[in-house]
Amino acid sequence: MRILFIGDVMGRSGRAALTRFVPRLREKWALDFIVVNGENAAGGFGVTEAICDEMLGLGVDCVTLGNHAFDQREALVFIERQPRLLRPINYPPGTPGRGANLFKAARGQQVLVVNPMGRVFMDALDDPFAAIERELGACPLGVGCDAILIDMHAETSSEKMAMGHFVDGRASLVVGTHTHTPTADAQIFPGGTAYQTDAGMTGDYDSIIGMEKEEPLRRFLRKTPGARYEPASGEATLCGVAAEIGADGLAAMIAPVRLGGRLRQEWPAEWGEP
Ligand SMILES: [Fe+2]
Ligand SMILES: [Fe+2]
């Protein structure tokens, strides 16, 4: 089973990269399932229903979120009627929407996607490890589903790596999001779980984590508020990982994907030129 996981889509330029690449890659690489982190898709802050529908319309199977999940207030409402949109699973009980769902992939495979959020240097939340333990218990790999994909939205590499090892052999793929910077540690853990600490963002890398440089830089130099943050508008690099999942639900291959924009281009050689 061929999976493409795409990191935080940053505003208009990130969405343009999705439009350019997703339909093409879906066909060229015969992808079975595509996950996109959409927490920054609407001007850098959250996601609207129109933008969520636009991403799903391109052939994305599941949109995950993070700390920006509800920056667009309408998400509190439409998330209830959009089963393909997930928010962090360890939000307190009563939060609208869901943090996990079971999907049908291109050839009928059952894919569980879970979206936990870390707690180190982030808002206080319920325990993401306990939440994952519950989900894996309710839908074990190879019994309840054919693949398990986890978007671990967290600030620190240690917390993401800990999650990867926590589920090693019990999940197909763990990819970190949130830092907007791709890491170079794609690997298959000893138990068979594919892992990369951060997917990177799908946005303009001539920026400060996707935002126009001037205002974030100004806030580092002078501790007073100024203008609003605006997403950078140059050509985005689509960033994420490609993974091949075997019949046992464990990973056979993981490779970084970086297409378009300023970053050095990367894709799985096994799958051919995009
Ligand atoms: Fe983000
Ligand atoms: Fe985030």
Image (cartoon, grey):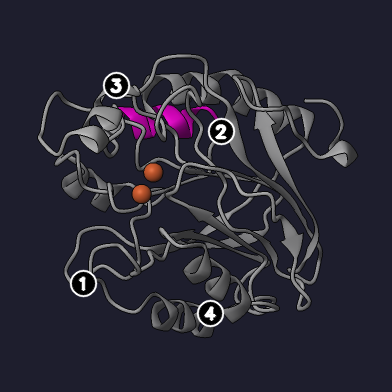
How crowded pointer 1 is (Cα within 10 Å; few <14, some 14-19, many 20+) is rated as few
Q: Residue 214 bears which disc, if any?
A: 3
| Foreground pick, 33 / 105 | 33
* Residue type, label 4: Leu
Q: In terms of sequence position, does the residue under pointer 1 or pointer 4 come before the other?
A: 1
Q: Where does residue 239 sit, x and y in percent of width and height?
A: 59, 36
Label 1 – label 4 distance at C-alpha: 19 Å
Q: Are marks 1 and 4 in contact (CB under 8 Å)?
A: no
Q: Dividing the image into four equal quarters, which quarter contains ligand 1?
A: top left
Disc 4: CA contacts within 10 A as few (<14), some (14-19) or many (>=20): some
Left/right of residue 234 with respect to residue 29 in the rendered view: left
- The nearer-to-camera label among 2 and 3 is 3
What amino acid type is highlighted by mark number 3? Glu
In this orientation, which residue lies closer to the viewer: 26 or 274? 274
Residue at 58 percent of width and 44 percent of height: 182
Taking the magenta stretch, the answer to whether it contains residue 99 is: no
Q: Which residue is mark 4?
A: 136
The numbered mark at residue 59 is 2
Q: Amino acid at mark 2?
A: Gly
CB-based contact (under 8 Å), mark 2 and mark 1: no
First in residue order: circle 4 vs circle 2: 2
Mark 1 or mark 4, whichever is nearer to me: 1
Predominant SS along the magenta part: helix
- Asked if marks 4 and 3 touch (Cβ < 8 Å), the reply is no
Q: Compared to 246, does 137 lie above or below? A: below
Q: Left or right: where does residue 82 sit relative to residue 139?
A: left
Is 206 placed left or right of 40 in the picture? Answer: right
Q: Secondary structure at mark 4?
A: helix
